[in-house]
């Protein structure tokens, strides 16, 4: 799953187990296809592989990965950016998963088939997105009326 401005997009969905840490490059490419340039990304520690580090460095993408090796000359600034990215990822993305599980039926999916489970997940994620977008539109309308 990738998230932009609080809205979740399903990058890859499988009934079978897979290593999500190998999907960072594909997730970034998917994000670029939707939104254009990506300059920062935040991900769990499982994504901090050498291959992902090389890709993000070559693509000039700032990450929240813990540094390997000696500190650079801009270490203080890197730590600040990394800390902020990690905090945002933890509160927004993980919080979003919690909301989807608690309010939209993804805590206990009782599906018995692969297609049924995928359908449950799809509707849970996109119902959450629809509610978030509707709330933003309502706030926007109220603000326009007030001004």
Image (cartoon, rainbow, N blue to C red):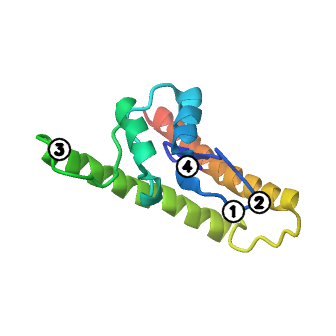
**Towards the viewer: 54 or 3:** 54
Q: Residue at x 56, y 41 (%)?
A: 27
In the rendered view, does 70 fall on the left or right side of 59? Answer: left
Task: Give x and y (percent) for residue 32.
Answer: 53, 29
Please rate how many residues cluster around mark 4, counting C-alpha atoms within 10 Å: few if below 14, some from 14 to 19, many from 20: some
Q: Going from the N terminus, do you reach mark 2 or mark 3 first?
A: 2
Q: Which residue is mark 1?
A: 17
Q: Which residue is mark 4?
A: 22
Task: Tell me whether circle 2 and circle 4 mark residues in contact (CB < 8 Å).
Answer: no
Quick one: SS at disc 4?
helix
Q: Going from the N terminus, do you reach mark 1 or mark 3 first?
A: 1
Q: Going from the N terminus, do you reach mark 3 or mark 4 first?
A: 4
Residue 123 sits in quarter: bottom right
Task: Give x and y (percent) for residue 92.
Answer: 46, 56
Quick one: SS at disc 3?
helix
Separation of disc 1 and disc 3 at Cα? 37 Å
Q: Which residue is mark 2?
A: 15
Q: Which mark is residue 77?
A: 3
Q: Residue at x 60, y 44 (%)?
A: 133
Which one is in front in this view, the residue at disc 3 or the one at disc 4?
Answer: 4
Task: Tell me whether circle 3 and circle 4 mark residues in contact (CB < 8 Å).
Answer: no
Q: Residue at x 35, y 55 (%)?
A: 86
Please rate how many residues cluster around mark 2, counting C-alpha atoms within 10 Å: few if below 14, some from 14 to 19, many from 20: few
């Amino acid at each position: 799953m990738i998230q932009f401005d609080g809205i979740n997009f399903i990058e890859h969905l499988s009934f079978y187990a897979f290593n999500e840490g190998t999907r960072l490059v594909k997730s970034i490419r998917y994000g670029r296809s939707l939104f254009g340039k990506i300059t920062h990304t935040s991900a769990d520690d499982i994504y901090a592989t050498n291959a992902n580090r090389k890709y993000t460095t070559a693509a000039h993408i700032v990450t929240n990965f813990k540094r390997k090796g000696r500190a650079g000359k801009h270490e203080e600034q890197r730590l600040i950016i990394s800390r902020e990215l990690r905090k945002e990822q933890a509160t927004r993305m993980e919080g979003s998963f919690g909301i989807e599980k608690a309010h939209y039926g993804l805590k206990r999916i009782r599906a018995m088939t692969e297609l049924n489970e995928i359908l449950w997940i799809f509707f849970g994620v996109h119902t959450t997105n629809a509610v978030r977008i509707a709330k933003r539109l309502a706030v926007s309308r109220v603000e326009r009326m007030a001004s």
